[in-house]
Amino acid sequence: MKEMEDTTIRLERSWLVGIQTDRVGKHESESLLRELGSLAATLGLEVRGSTPVRVRDRNPALFVGTGKADEIVAIAKGAEVDSILFDHVLTPIQQRNWEELSGLKVYDRSELILRIFAGRALTREASLQVELAELEYALPRLAHSYSALSRQRGGRYGTKGKGEQKIELDRREIERRIHEIKEELKVVRTRRDTQRKRRERQAVPRAAVVGYTNAGKSSLLNALCDSGILAEDKLFATLDPTTRRMTTVKGAVLLLTDTVGFVRNLPHGLVEAFKATLEEAALADLLVEVVDASDPESDRHMETTNEVLREIGAGDVPRVVVLNKVDLLDEVTAAGLASRHPGAHPASIRTGFGLEGINAAIEAALVENDSVANFRIPDAEYALVALLHREALVLGESREDNATIVEARVPERVGKRLEKYIVR
């Protein structure tokens, strides 16, 4: 009797290489290496092991010394892996040299994150943004054939399937496609700006949920807004900004937006590409920062979040900090975390613990600096009446000679702008 053919699909097996330098200490290197393993698992790779490397003098050809390179290749081949993953950016030449030396596929951290983003992009805008980042990464690597960027769609969004296609693009074709994507993104962003302005005209406060990837941002949005957006225990489960309407305990209404999770050493091209979702944080009246309190690196994750927020101009936006997953902590660890972050709100979104407190904190933070005032707006400045309808909560409106009297609850920034029109 003929044996049945084994049709089991084997996962790609990988070996990780962690890098320690003068700027990246041992503890940080070990933490980043663990995170690289999580990134690999998110992509569906089977991690067979890892090798930490201390790099003092960078080798232009291989980044590490030739002796250490031979050692890594021998270990990787002994583990029968298909690929080697570096927790550091490799130049195109270094990547090509490693593949020639090992006979295996070689990725760096940037390419790994790009591949994850490529598999998670669902909307037209996100797909275009990811493709743009992929092509800009590929441009200096034309002489290097690799599978990570073989799924270029070409043409417009949705015209081809998601299956990977092995193709070769010359520099002119890549530059043409980059130009085409940028033009398409202009159109998409114009439509998104129109949608945002429509929301602004409703005079509804806006809050953005931010934080390190996999901290529980989407779960919090679901819990507070009773929505059903994707919330998985994976890195970068959410890429596209999702906005839902939230009602506070006292009945106030606001718009709450989920944003893409942050991560250390995010490829710069993706930081630029995903300004679309991060813009929601920069334009928000309030940030709700979610922290995975059970992660030993939670403090470092908060530092990364703050760095990215400062980069996009949202560093000074008021925020409510949520320490999620405290149900996984012992009392001593929980007390230590609370002492380091006074004012933060301990919670377990999974069990529902702390949700009412978060709801109340969001409401209190949104109105903390608001004030109620009467404004006398001359007819010549009638555009300021529209501003109040757009940026404040109008409580009443009446007419008198050559002016409009508006009673409104205004955020501090609006009140300062219209200070000279306040009726004393």
Image (spheres, grey):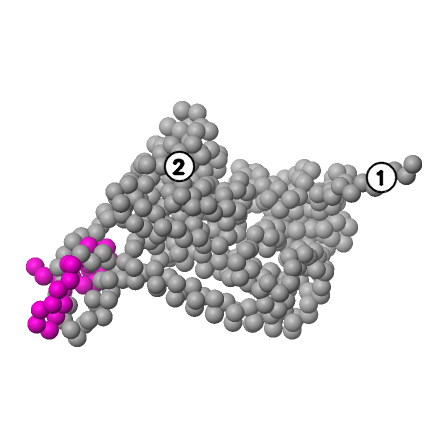
**The magenta stretch spans which residues?**
396-424
Q: Position of residue 281 (x, y in %)?
A: 39, 54
The residue closer to the viewer here, 202 or 19, is 202
Mark closer to the observer (2, 1):
1
Quadrant of the frame with the C terminus: bottom left
Q: In this rendering, is residue 352 above or below 143?
A: above
The residue closer to the viewer here, 229 or 101, is 229
Q: Position of residue 85 (x, y in %)?
A: 66, 47
Q: Is residue 272 a member of the stretch shown in magenta?
A: no
Query: Can residue 310 be spotted in the picture?
Result: no
Amino acid on which the number 2 mark rests in the picture: Leu
Residue at the image point whose x is 35% and y is 34% from the top: 354
Q: Position of residue 164 (x, y in %)?
A: 68, 57
- Disc assigned to residue 268: none
The residue closer to the viewer here, 341 or 182, is 182
Residue density around tag 1, few if under 14, some if 14–19, many if 20 or more, within 10 Å: few
Q: In this rendering, is residue 131 above or below 383?
A: above
Residue at mark 1? 4
Quadrant of the frame with the N terminus: top right
Query: Can residue 416 be spotted in the picture?
Result: yes
Residue at the image point whose x is 25% and y is 42% from the top: 250
Tell me which label, 2 or 1, sits earlier in the chain: 1
Amino acid on which the number 1 mark rests in the picture: Met
Residue at mark 2? 323
Q: Residue furthest front?
A: 1
The residue closer to the viewer here, 355 or 236, is 355
